Image (tube, rainbow, N blue to C red):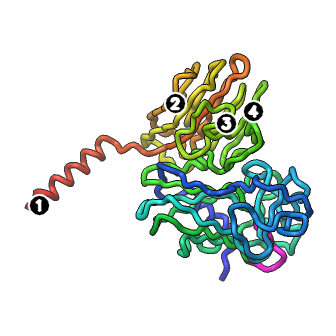
Amino acid sequence: MRPSQLSLKTTLTVLILTGAPLFAASITIQNPSFQAQDFTSFPGYLGGANPATITGWGTTGGAGINGNDIGAGAPFADNGTIPDGSRVAFIQGGGSLSQTVTGLTAGKQYWLQGYVNSRGPGASPLGSMPAVGVSFGGTPILPAQPIPAVGGANAYHKVNIPFTAAATSGEILISSAPFTGGDVALAIDGITLIQRDAGEVVVFNPSFEASGTGLNFPGYLPNIAGWTRTLGIGGNSAVNTAGGPFSNGFSPEGLNHVVLQNEASLSQELSGVVIGNSYRLTLDYYGRDGIAPTGLITIDGKTALSGLIPNGGGQLSLSYDFVASSSTPTLNIANLGVGADSSLLFDNISLRAIPEPASSLLALLGTTLLYRRRR
């Protein structure tokens, strides 16, 4: 018996919000948000006037690229807000996307993150939807999950999949097939892979690798995967590499970092936090040479950093401890835009639980008693 759509969405939420999160190096994925090519011919299928392959990815079945800035248009991405940049990959009917990645450490835990959506029900029989499954190195890490359309301008479904690497390399295989029949299509965006350890709250796209590299100068993006953008006077946001026009060589984790130019902010609502427990927020930040930005970083309504951000002196790191007053706290990072043409850079965001001193003492006491018992 197949579960109802409500229970399906609940299952997907559990995959997103539970588990033991992470912290450490991200693994480079080629063309993670599918911005590398122009697909000029509607409806975006591979071949013909369009490229024959998707840069960095192998494909089977009816795959292609859609985007609201290219000639292919977005017939298969007809609802929801594209998570990163302005393009997505799609799989119509049955098919797959795959890419082999390297640089993992065997035995370490990794989290594969991405954003998915279904073509709207108006294009196929009511209730039809695709089912997405994921494997790594030939081992399934996500059983086939039906994906309902988010509708309107809502956010795509966020997916966070924990797994333990069995080797230093492996193939990411994302497959799609009709779950309830009909001419269904799956939209996919912002694929990232980061090594994660226990004790950290899930932050989506914490080092901004979902945008990939090779963005058009100077790296401005309308949407950055996992984050909500707010712009004020002269405000903009960009993703740069260490050699980008805003970066001054800054890129502490992975290849990318984010830039908030003038009055701008990014925010993300987090989940899996326990009210009354202690947590530590860490991130790396910097001010672009020139006008020093005025930064404001808040978490759970508490101010973690406020004031002028030094620039020209190298990378800075923030570590802020607090007691949670909400199970879904919001992290907000802002350049207040005081002064002309200032830019705040940040990267490498982590939120992890801090063991209570009493718990640590009990753990130590338990270890001592166990040692005595063995003696």
Rendering coords of residue 113 (x, y %): 60, 57
Q: Nearer the viewer, mark 2 or mark 1?
A: 2
- Which secondary structure, mark 4? strand
- As shown in the figure, which amino acid type bears the numbered disc 2? Gln
Q: CA distance from mark 2 to mark 3?
A: 15 Å
Residue 239, quarter of the rendered image: top right
Mark 2 in CB contact with mark 3 (< 8 angstroms):
no
- Which secondary structure, mark 2? loop
Q: Is residue 194 left or right of residue 278?
A: right
Q: Nearer the viewer, residue 176 or 298?
A: 176
At 44% from the left and 34% from the top, the residue drawn is 321
- Which secondary structure, mark 1? helix
Q: CA distance from mark 4 to mark 3?
A: 15 Å
Question: Where does the magenta region start and end?
Answer: 178-187
Q: Nearer the viewer, residue 165 or 275?
A: 165
Residue identified by numbered label 3: 244
Rendering coords of residue 58 (x, y %): 69, 69
- As shown in the figure, which amino acid type bears the numbered disc 4? Asn
Q: N-terminal of the two: label 4 or label 2?
A: 4
Residue identified by numbered label 2: 315
